[in-house]
Amino acid sequence: MGGGGAALFQVTQAGQLLAAGGIGAAAGTVTAIAPVTTGSDSFVYTVVRQTDQIMAWRQTAPGTFTAIETLRHTPEGSGLDQLALTTAQAGGAHWLLAASHVDHTLTSYRIEADGRLQITARLGADGGLGIAGPAHVEVITFQGQTYAILGATGTSSVSVVRIEADGALTVTDQVNDTLDTRFQGVTALQVVETGGRVYVIAAGADDGLTVMTLLPGGRLAGLQTIAHQPGQDLMNPAALTAQVVSPGIIRLYSAEQGVAAFSGWTLNVDPAGGITQQAGAGGGALAGTAGDDVLIGGAGADAITAGAGRDILIDGAGQDTLTGGPGADLFVFQPDGLLDRIQDFQPGVDRLDLSALTRNHSLDAIGFQTLSNGVRLTIGADQIQIVTANGQPLSRSDFRTSDLFDLWHIDVGVTAIARILTGGGANDLLQGGVADDILTGEAGNDTLRGDMGDDVLNGGPGADLLDGGPGIDTADYTGSTGSLRVDLMFPHVNTNIALGDTFQSIENLIGSQGMDNLRG
């Protein structure tokens, strides 16, 4: 890439690179590229340097690509941007994801059968994605869900966004760098899967990297932070590659900024092969293995017993009893207002994650009551009774903040994001969600249903049904040319582009640029 166009190569099984054609200088200076194959067709999407232009290309012959579309990522903006691209599959469809360094958003585009793009959703700070300067975006499918993992340089953050079946975007977690982690500025990001577990590796300008795992539901948990040592090339790492060489074994390669060398080392994330298991809603018992297990409680009173690995035990609603067994374990607690128990805590070895119980990641947010064989913690309405493995008492002085709070999780909630849906020339059905959606029918006799939220519905040409649903909804005719008459109560008198339109649960009208007659 760069210098005008992009060269494409095929990697053989022997590791050789074979020239496979490319995209010509018409693509400009390419700074991002994302290929996808849908059925028998292959497409490539590129970004022109320092612009918000996304170009779509179809492969018409081996190594030959023809431009089919150029679109502006932010039509109302300055035209200047720096986009990161990747593709994903969700809900049986293919999607292009674009992370914007300028407006700090993640946008999903549906890839149509002909390779053209249809914007579906745009997620930013108002939807729970409080980031600045996203520069890295990776996609992984985990337990039937598709997630985008974003690394943002300005906020030194790693975010997890679930891609819904219809292309909508939902933030499930975000963690920011602290003095206990090493991904300041997120200079590199890798996501790999092995043994049914997903590992997120983020490197930073603070000379190191942090290894995390993705939990069911889309939450991150910290596993290990590696600071620079001689021979590791982790002084401000600019590039990072992770490769699974065998189950539970990840090979890492890193290169420093401005240094013509790289180094590699091995991460044993789960060489014994653990399991991920979740209890049912009625309470029950879970038993782990000798590997690194993830055991998750349900809605009832659960007894969760892990084995000898480095396990993650997550309580659910209900009064739960957690036993970690040998190994460095992480106990994760969710708010339920009840008393939970840890039966065999190893001080200095095991950790707790109380970040879901309080936003105040400080020992001052916790009440400590020393017991003869441990300690009782009080965090708001929740209590945790910790029994030590050696039967010795514990007090506040036995804990550091990093022993009780895992990563610095940002309060994002699980927020439904506004949908931006656009139809085509057929008779389309566009369905909004619970947020404030924008539905545009274009040509055809379309049905637009806003559902919850304060929605904006624009039917376009054709006899359209605009159904706002609950909320304060608007029928929008700003794209119409010439004068028109729109009557919400007596739509049979509508004229121009509104002719044939009917309305349900529409409270507001926006007219055209002409001399309009608008009636509620």
Image (cartoon, rainbow, N blue to C red):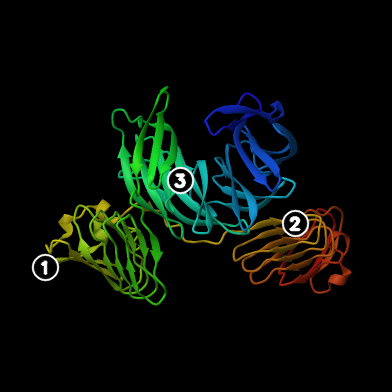
**Amino acid type, callout 3:** Val
Residue at the spot of label 3: 192
Within-10-Å neighbours for mark 1: few <14, some 14–19, many 20+: few
Residue type (three-letter) at the residue carrying disc 1: Ser
Helix, strand or loop at disc 2? loop
Residue sitting at x 63%, y 40%: 35
Q: Please provide percent x and percent y for residue 453.
A: 62, 66
User: Residue under circle 1?
Assistant: 372
* Secondary structure beneath label 3: strand
Which is nearer the N-term, disc 3 or disc 2? 3
Q: Residue at x 60, y 27 (%)?
A: 18
State the quadrant of the C terminus: bottom right
Q: In this view, does 499 lie to the left or right of 83?
A: right
| Cα–Cα span, label 3 and label 2 | 36 Å
User: At which x and y percent is residue 58?
Assistant: 72, 39
Q: Which mark is residue 423?
A: 2
Amino acid type of the residue tagged 2 in the rendering = Gly
Task: Answer with the quarter of the image where residue 4 lies.
Answer: top right
Instruction: Report x, y in % for residue 6.
Output: 64, 29
Image spot of residue 300 (x, y percent): 37, 75
